[in-house]
Image (spheres, grey):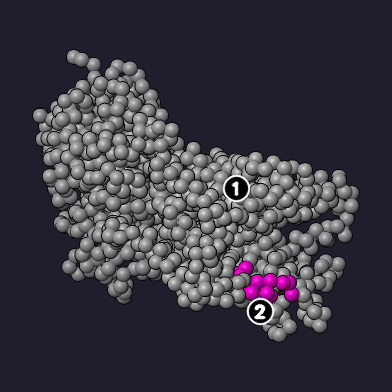
Amino acid sequence: MNLKDFEIKNFIPLITLFILVILLTIVNPEFLTVYNLKSIFIQASVLMILSTGVTFIILTGGIDLSIGALISLASVLIAVLLPNLGYFAFFIVILVGALAGLINGLVITKGKVPSFIVTLGTSGIWLSLAYVLCNGKPIALSTKYRHYIGWMSGEVFGIPNIVIIALSTVALFWFVLNSTTFGKYIFSIGNGERASILSGIKVNRIRTMAFMLNSTLVAFGGILLFGRLSAGNPNVGASYLLPAIASVIVGGTDLTGGFGGVKRSIVGVFIITLIKNGMNVIGVEAFAQQIVFGSIMIIFAALSMDREKIEILK
Amino acid sequence: MTAPYLQLEKMTKEYPGVVALNKVDIKVNYNEVVGLVGENGAGKSTLLKIISGIESPDSGNYFLEGKEVKYNSLLEAHKDGISLVFQEQSLLPNISVAENIFLGSEEKYMKFGMLNKKKMYEETRKYLEMVDSEIDPGTLTGNLEFSDRQMIEIAKSLRIVEESDQKNSIILFDEPTSVLEDEEIKKLFEIINEIKKDHSVIFVSHRLDEVIEISDRVYILKDGKNVEDRPTKNINQKELHNLMVGRSLQEEYYKIKDQNEIDYINGKVVLATNDLTEQKNKNFCDCCFELYEGEILGFAGVQGSGKEQLGRALFGLEQVMGEIKCESYKDIIDFPPEAINRGIAYIPKERSLEGLVFGFDVNDNINLPNYRNINKYGVIDKEEAKEVSRKWVKRLGIKTPSIHTPSGSLSGGNQQKVVLAKWLAINEINILILDHPTRGIDVGAKEEIYELMREVVKRGISIILTSDTLEELIGLSNRIHVMKDGEIVKTFMAEKDNKPTQEQIVSHMV
Amino acid sequence: MLSFDNDFLKKLKKYDYTFIVPIVFLIAIWVTIFTVNPLFLNLRSILSVLVTAVPLIICAFGVTHVIRLGSIDLSIEGQAAFSAVLVSFLLQNNLNNFDLGFWAVIIAVLATTLIGLLNGVIHTQVKIPSFISSFGLGAIATGAAILIYRGEPISITDNGFRGFFTNWNFNIPNILFITAVVFIFLYYLQKKTIIGTYVDAIGGDEKLTRLNGIPVDKFKIISFGIAGFCYGIAGVILAARLGTGTADLSTGLLLNSIAAVLLGGTALQGGNGGVIRTLIGAIIISSLKTGIIVLRINPYFQEGFIGIVLVTVLLLGAKRGKLVINK
């Protein structure tokens, strides 16, 4: 339990979510119908998976700017490989994701370079690969192979498969974060890296594993996205970077690391998704979304940061 | 009797957990050099920080030439002619010498925002001449040697003195000679004697002979309080040292009667080093020593002697060459997990940064190295963890409302007990490296820790102890290695009934 | 912050390899290009390469000031896009009745300078790390840009404006004169004013600088403002050369500008470097991209290659030490 668990500012994301739900219901009485809620959950699915991975990274005090590029790469890669390798293609794409995370992690830990710049560099590499693989144009999945993505598009007892997948993934990693040694080490590193090193925690290894985990989840997200669009698209990832990071920050996970978690990020995901949704309903242009997300990200980052922890801000 | 130039009355300053200054009085007359001595932690640095404007006192009065003053920053004090020559140097490494000397007061050389560098350099040369330095004003400060930089630091203070509106000024010197050679120290004393003709000086140093030579009067501080002040013509080093150090060895306090008897002939050596050398900065060289089972081995030395780095090297925190023989291994330890595997634990000096994970509660902090032992396929056994922490909270007498209390709310002494608990909870640990273990802890808690140390060695654990308080080191250790400039220069036996004196040890430290 | 690491400095004293290596690298690249395609070996071709590199060069100049502080600015693309769109919105165009001529340029550059200052203010006063404040602000700027043209690209019809930026005089493109002017102005700021001194001081050791009483926040804000100023100019140039105002004009500028700064030899931690190094770095980046095209490698590899080069440079320049904390 943390000193900060009981401060008022922890409840701001939940309160915000609550207010949003109320506002949207007022504007649109259809909001709280099963049909609409289903659609919101479907919309939020990919983002839920992405932000779970990003949560681990931000908890260690880092950031990953390459997730957009990696999603694009994953979606293009699966589109290219599926016709040739069948189900094995999914496995390969996940592996590629893990490899991407490994590269990020190694350069950051061995090279002792800040994560934002390494991931900026690797984002260029992944995006390049994505464009090269598809020659700059989206690859549609032909109907011949549609059955491969059936597992993503069905429903079970009225709940869309994709939502079940997303929620189970989130639940699994929530468990990992809160009940395993790995999770404990992640919080430890974020809260006190020097003390963690001096307690015998293999910080470099844990950090690299966090980046691998994140990238694997991102690749998985790319696969799900591919399933929803039935196409691999090198441009699709760019619009997920800001929302993924914003969700985690808006959810209340502290940028300086060590405080927060998967539950909070999911709250953040829904705040973001509802805002998107709401903007469409009110008729505000999708273009303005970036303005809103950028602003709330800054505001919530300011609120959630523990300034006593860092002496110098760069 | 004329009024003093500078006078501080009843200065009090507290930091979390420790009272740095307790109603300290100090007075400096015109054209006087006042020395300031005391052990580490006596309050000298804090006093200097308050006089120079870096910090504000919690209470007390500060008078300059009879008028009460209050400074909120270094620059404000500069205007009144008060400047500090820092111990760790305030010069910025990646700007030029001239820029450093005039840092903060460049307006005189600016026109429409543009710096007249030529004029600045000219003026810089003037000040550099005053300290007999021929360095080019355009040199990047970071490229210079320590001693050159110290001279520039002094030149900077001379500049501040000249530019101030006051007729009289004061320059504070904080351990200025630690990086200087004999020649340069002579030069420094010449400069100070020149300064004395018009201004005043406060001179802080560990080197008592220097203090006596250069000062007219000397103040002795101990534990944040005034001990005495004497004219230097009436005092010698030995007296000064005694005043600094004060109380005689307290048998009760350090539980000396409980000290383990170590059989140095047949006893088991649990750790030995061979030619251990720190590679990067040469903090220590060719260190060879042995640690016996159940022993408390103390390391004495001034700052920079390498004693702290030696301890850290045993935990894998420094890049070293040589051998560390422990268990069946001989090679050096690369990083903490290796040290832990060999049964070595380290309790760091910086408790809040390195000892405890501050956002964690007591339970998590005690179990942090232990979690890898109490999990099934990675899933932590939370019940067992709680049992472990409850057990150790009880055993060590840690005063906390519950094991789920955030570690940050515990007092210094109890925090340190948590750090100890975390390593004692691991059975394989049989060597503890304690780096200034009672720093920032009140007297009562210190005693409890000393008791713990005695208990723990009785069970076969061995301790390597580093401390700035010589008295503590002597009281607790079985043996003491004195380090100077990175080498072990002398070893003292410190048996129950035959403890060495502080003077004996100090004479080898400096 | 091992600023006084003696071994490293002794090497530096002998020869400043962080300055020489990039130059050598640049020469190597051009030698390769000329060998593969000797037709390139004429002034006009080289100048054309430089011309396409101008927005990158100027953005890199801008972000240099932030990196020297030890901070980062991820808002480059957003601010440049905003400037490009704003300027096309205010010039004679196919969408509205504005025709402000050069006032449009002034307004656009002023706007991004203000955004830059805001960036610095948010970072220093709200006290959040620069990568988040600039990331967020960049998104806001991009959103604002998109909002201005609402999906329909603006076509600039003011030919005088476009001409100014595309013509050549004395056999040298106007744009290069402009770049030279900006360069001289920034160099002057760096070497001859207090800004240069204090920025280096802050980047070298912020705590110590504050201790000396220097108003650190003020100079951080100024640096971010200078950066914004540069992005604005770059945006205007982009709009002029392409004749339209859309938000994706600035794509790629972020990675390439930062890579340019680092390749030029400026350290990521701050405290050294400047526009000269960045100029070399930016030319290296453009040359690398040109090289990829000349060598007939798939142009989509350009960004990836720059990414690899960036990561490699980071690995090479990494700090060694046991307890270096990195996030």
A221 relative to C83, above or below: below
Q: Nearer the viewer, residue B260 or B223?
A: B223
Q: Is residue A134 magenta?
A: yes
Q: Chain of mark 1?
A: C
A131 relative to C80, above or below: below
Amino acid under disc 2: Phe
Relative to A48, C36 lies left or right: left
Distance CA(mark 1)–CA(mark 2): 45 Å
Q: Chain of mark 2?
A: A
Q: Which region shows up in magenta? A: A125-139
Q: Is residue C306 visible?
A: no
Q: Which mark is residue C232?
A: 1
Relative to C143, B108 lies left or right: left
Name the dominant secondary structure of the magenta segment. helix
Amino acid under disc 1: Gly
Relative to B276, A66 lies left or right: right
Q: Nearer the viewer, residue B480 or C235?
A: C235
Q: Is residue C109 magenta?
A: no
Which residue appears at 27% of the width and 29% of the height? B161
Which residue appears at 33% of the width and 17% of the height? B67
Q: Nearer the viewer, residue A306 or B265?
A: A306
Is the same chain shared between marks 1 and 2?
no
Sort mark 2 into few (<14), some (14-19) or many (20+) by Cα contacts within 10 Å: some
| Tag 2 secondary structure | helix
Q: Which residue is mark 2?
A: A91
- Residue C163 coordinates in the image, percent (x, y): 64, 52
